[in-house]
Image (tube, rainbow, N blue to C red):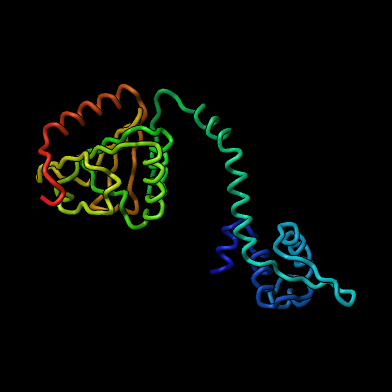
Amino acid sequence: MPQETLQKLGLSQNEAKIYEALLDLKEASAGQISSKTEIHRRNVYDTINRLINKGLVFPILAKGENFYSPVDPEKLAELVKEKEMDLEKIMPELQKRFQKRENSQEAYIYRDIEGMKNYMRDILREGKDVYSVGAKLGWFDIRLKTFRQEFFKEAQRKKINFYSIFDAEVKKELDEETKPLGQSYRFLPKNYSTNSAVDIFADYVVTFTGVGYKQVNENVTIFVLKDHDLAESYRKWFQFIFDSCPKGTAKG
């Protein structure tokens, strides 16, 4: 498991193996490292040099032969922060180029949990209020917990408001966890619940199939349409439904 995590942080498989081995060995020669990791000695030298360049290993000269020792694992956290800082520097340019690719009309599909995250990122990027019909609290799927918490923090910072028309089943389930959605909501009559939902924000109309109460199906499909006039029409229809539904209360 540690090796898998180290690789996710940007280390190669051999780099992760050798660094982890040195944590146990404290200090070792290339031959000793090769024996413990079963990595060919020639590859050990190449990999150690890369680890030295990354600041994760340092050489110790003893009796004419180099020994190697690992740097405190806190260095890994520093490397992550350095990468984040590098990304922040180029982010404005990347965003500028991303925005350029947008046309007045678009249509595409997101799928599964990662697709949900992409759609939620779209909301943050646009920074506009969100209107939901047939809402089921799909964002509160347990698999989205960490991502959702950061999403709502950023939404609050950008002053994004949420207006929801929930399925009737949600009425008794709103709780402390759902507070970030605010108090601007209504409930559909019982006979009008579905396994689909529609969200409108900025120039986007997003429709879902495969969503349930606080749950997103593994193969959820998210249809994204971008069209200013279409989004405006959906907002008007939303407002009609919103005004027609009784206010009620979360626990009513």
* Residue sitting nearer the eye, 181 or 14: 181
Is the residue 188 above or below the residue 31 in the image?
above
Is the residue 129 above or below the residue 31 in the image?
above
Is the residue 28 above or below the residue 161 in the image?
below
Query: Which quadrant of the structure image shows residue 23?
Result: bottom right
Q: Is residue 113 visible?
A: no
Is the residue 160 above or below the residue 9 in the image?
above
Percent of width and height locating residue 217: 31, 53
Q: Is residue 243 visible?
A: yes
* Residue sitting nearer the eye, 121 or 183: 183
Percent of width and height locating residue 27: 74, 75
Image side of residue 66 versus residue 44, left or right: right
Residue in the picture at 33% in, 57% down: 142
Tag count in the figure?
0
Query: Which quadrant of the structure image shows residue 53?
Result: bottom right
Percent of width and height locating residue 75: 65, 61
Image side of residue 230 versus residue 108, left or right: left
Image side of residue 167 versus residue 149, left or right: left
Image side of residue 172 versus residue 50, left or right: left
Residue in the picture at 15% in, 53% down: 172
